[in-house]
Image: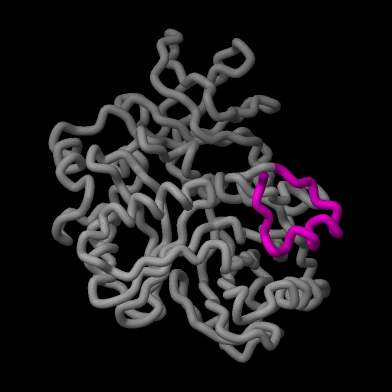
Amino acid sequence: MLKRTIFYNKHQNLNAKLIDFGGFEMPVQYQGIKQEHLAVRNKAGLFDVSHMGEFFVTGPKALDLIQKVTINDASKLVPGKAQYTAMCYEDGGIVDDLIVYMLEDEKYLLVVNASNIEKDFRWIEKQNSMGAGLEDRSDTYSLLALQGPKAPEILQKLTDTNVSEIPFYNFKTGSVAGEPGIIISATGYTGEKGFELYLDNEKCDPLKVWDEILNAGEQFGLEPAGLGARDTLRLEMGYALYGNDITKDTHPLEARMGWLTKFDKGDFIGKGALLRIKENGLSRKLAGFVIDEPRNVPRAGYDIVDENGNQIGFVTSGTQSISLSKGIGMGYIDLKHATEGETVFIKIRKKAVPAEVVKPPFLKK
């Protein structure tokens, strides 16, 4: 039985096309992926992302547990700040990527991917030998993402919090549409200005917030947007998707997450393995590529080959870029071929299509 978010009936009333995503019945599109994608790039889009997981880590040992299980340095956080990070297994493989919010002293919120909620919670629980408070609140929290250049103007109509003063990866707690205690976070997965709103279903009315945002955004061209547009938007920015670009079989150093990996912060799970990998050197890395030949769309799983047809990698994410009108993608490519400007070939329908290796983001903002 698929889970449903609190907004399920709203999606049905808007004639959304619903699919199974991470065990949830979620809207993949309403009016169409292209229309929703362009709305977010030029105006604004509203996404239901309540399928994401929310864990609260509390008490005097909260930071110790977070430092042990994540690769970034959470000791640098102060209340009101968020941090992108990842968790690794002992061998350096990626458990998940996540965001850590420092809500107050000894109280943190960890936001994880929908398909990994149970796995992640069990993993963190297993590492909690220090006895930090740990609670999975995924079923009692809703999450809305208001994204696009008009997002600040739309949200400002509904809150006394000065949203334009919230820097990227910072947050404030305030009222939205008269509903209290909402975390207003200047984060997102689209590359546009925007906010993610964390709503405690037990303390506020998420359905009212959804309706009020859509009403406030009508004059700005706001549209409800589904997971299809979320995927095309994130890929144009080169953002990794767990299960595609990062998995238990990939590690942060090859996955363009070396900048997150703080070896000098003290011990963390996977540190030894990652140090050995760093010492021995990488054999491949996650690289971006662009195809100029029209009507050639790369897809996850396609082979990447050299000019002689030898396999040198594979595609992890690919699409026809709606903003650029050309094929774009990411994939793991043997290190010697993964240099910017290098020509590689994507096997599409038995044909080897030339592609140029580029450094994401594909869409320069």
Q: Position of residue 262 (x, y in %)?
A: 22, 56
Q: Position of residue 302 (x, y in %)?
A: 53, 22
Asked where in the image residue 214 lies, by quadrant, the reply is bottom right
Residue for point 59% across, 74% down: 199
Q: Position of residue 42 (x, y in %)?
A: 70, 61
Name the quadrant of the N terminus.
top right
Compared with residue 49, is residue 218 higher up or lower down, i.e. above or below?
Answer: below
Asked where in the image residue 164 lies, by quadrant, the reply is bottom right
Would you say residue 18 sits in the magenta stretch?
yes
Span of residues in magenta: 1-19
In this view, the residue in front, 96 or 340, is 96
- Left or right of 159? Residue 235 is left
Residue for point 37% across, 72% down: 108
How many marks are shown on the rendered structure? Answer: 0
Compared with residue 166, is residue 132 higher up or lower down, i.e. above or below?
Answer: above
Name the quadrant of the C terminus.
bottom right
Residue for point 60% across, 77% down: 202
In this view, the residue in front, 195 or 242, is 242
Q: Position of residue 91 (x, y in %)?
A: 24, 37
Residue for point 55% across, 45% down: 235
Compared with residue 214, is residue 25 higher up or lower down, i.e. above or below?
Answer: above
Task: Name the residue furthest top.
Answer: 308
